[in-house]
């Protein structure tokens, strides 16, 4: 008994979709580790790289969910990343200014 014949394009597409799913799971898992278990990440890659990853994921989440449902002037994505409630204005998140350096001009992450 042999496997059923499948055209090359179908096999290639299934393999590509599988790799994209794997990359999405790894991306989300790394973001969760950076946000919720920073001590584990620091022990593996070091403090400097963990801070850069933290800043990158914070900006990514702030751009992904840039709305502000509770009116506290903090993006919902940044609040979700920091572990606070985006629907409650009284839940505050840890204040840590993140500067992302693009060449020589510093850019501050903000709600836009």
Image (spheres, rainbow, N blue to C red):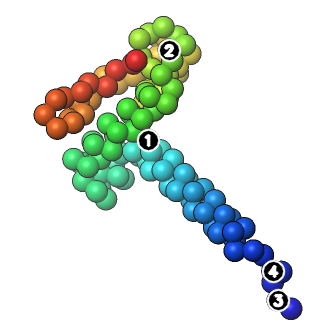
Name the secondary structure under disc 2.
loop
The mark lying in front, picked from 3 and 2, is 3
Please indicate whether residue 105 sits to the left or right of residue 64 in the image. left
Q: Can residue 89 be spotted in the picture?
A: yes
Give the residue number, with chain letter if any, for mark 3.
2
Does residue 9 lie above or below 105 as drawn?
A: below
Does residue 23 lie above or below 108 as drawn?
A: below
Give the residue number, with chain letter if any, for mark 2.
68
> How far from the left and from the top, in percent, is residue 92?
41, 17
Please indicate whether residue 49 sits to the left or right of residue 23 in the image. left
> How far from the left and from the top, in percent, is residue 109?
31, 25
Identify the mark nearer the N-term, 3 or 1: 3
Mark sitting on residue 36: 1
How far separated are the C-alphas under marks 3 and 1? Answer: 47 Å
Identify the mark nearer the N-term, 2 or 1: 1
Residue that lies at the very extreme toward the top in this rendered image: 71
């Amino acid at each position: 008994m042999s496997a059923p014949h499948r055209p090359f394009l179908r096999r290639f597409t299934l393999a590509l979709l599988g790799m994209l799913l794997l990359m999405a799971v790894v991306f989300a898992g790394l973001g969760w580790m950076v946000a919720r278990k920073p001590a584990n990440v620091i022990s593996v890659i070091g403090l400097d790289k963990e801070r850069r990853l933290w800043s990158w994921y914070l900006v990514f989440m702030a751009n992904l969910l840039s709305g502000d449902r509770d009116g506290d002037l903090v993006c919902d994505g940044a609040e979700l990343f920091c572990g606070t409630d985006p629907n409650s204005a009284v839940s505050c998140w840890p204040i840590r200014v993140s500067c992302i350096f693009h060449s020589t001009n510093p850019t501050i992450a903000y709600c836009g």
